[in-house]
Image (tube, rainbow, N blue to C red):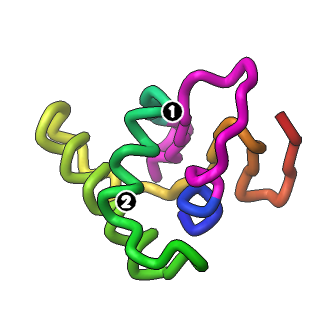
Amino acid sequence: MWLEAMWTGYDVSGSVSATELVFSVPVEPRMDISYAMHAEDFKTLWNDIHESKDEVMLEEANNLFQCLYSHFCRHFRIHLSATQLVKVTASVASAHCEGKEVPQ
């Protein structure tokens, strides 16, 4: 969550037009939920939450994800807070919970 919040502030023009979050649902067989939103919309939300321009605070990252979780639950009745965030993709980079990072 913190990486995604940190990456959101970067302006990088490239091929990634969406910010994607992948959540693993704790069921068998394994199921993932992909949650993508336009990068500019994600950045607007982050700018509304982010108070300190010098550093990314953990509380701000938590607030960002609480907003995303609430929005997703309101529309799909799925509680992402009961899942595990396993991958984030932004215009800057992509990271997986297994530690693999691929520059965009």
Residue 99: percent from the left, percent from the top? Answer: 83, 59
Q: Identify which residue is drawn at 54% across, 35% down.
A: 19
Q: Which residue is mark 2?
A: 65
Please say if 34 is above or below 86: above
Decide if residue 103 is on the left or right side of residue 26. Answer: right
* In the image, residue 96 lies in the stretch drawn in magenta: no
For the record, the magenta segment spans: 7-32
Task: Work out whether residue 82 can be spotted.
Answer: no
Label 1 crowd (10 A; few <14 / some 14-19 / many >=20): some
Decide if residue 75 is on the left or right side of residue 39. Answer: left
Q: Can you tell which quarter of the image residue 89 is in?
A: top right
Task: Work out whether residue 62 can be spotted.
Answer: yes
What is the distance, in whole Å, between disc 2 and disc 1 at their CAs?
15 Å
Residue 58: percent from the left, percent from the top? Answer: 49, 80
Q: Can you tell which quarter of the image residue 1 is in?
A: bottom right
Q: Identify which residue is drawn at 51% across, 33% down.
A: 39
Q: Which residue is mark 1?
A: 39
Query: Which residue sits furthest top?
Result: 15
* In the image, residue 20 lies in the stretch drawn in magenta: yes
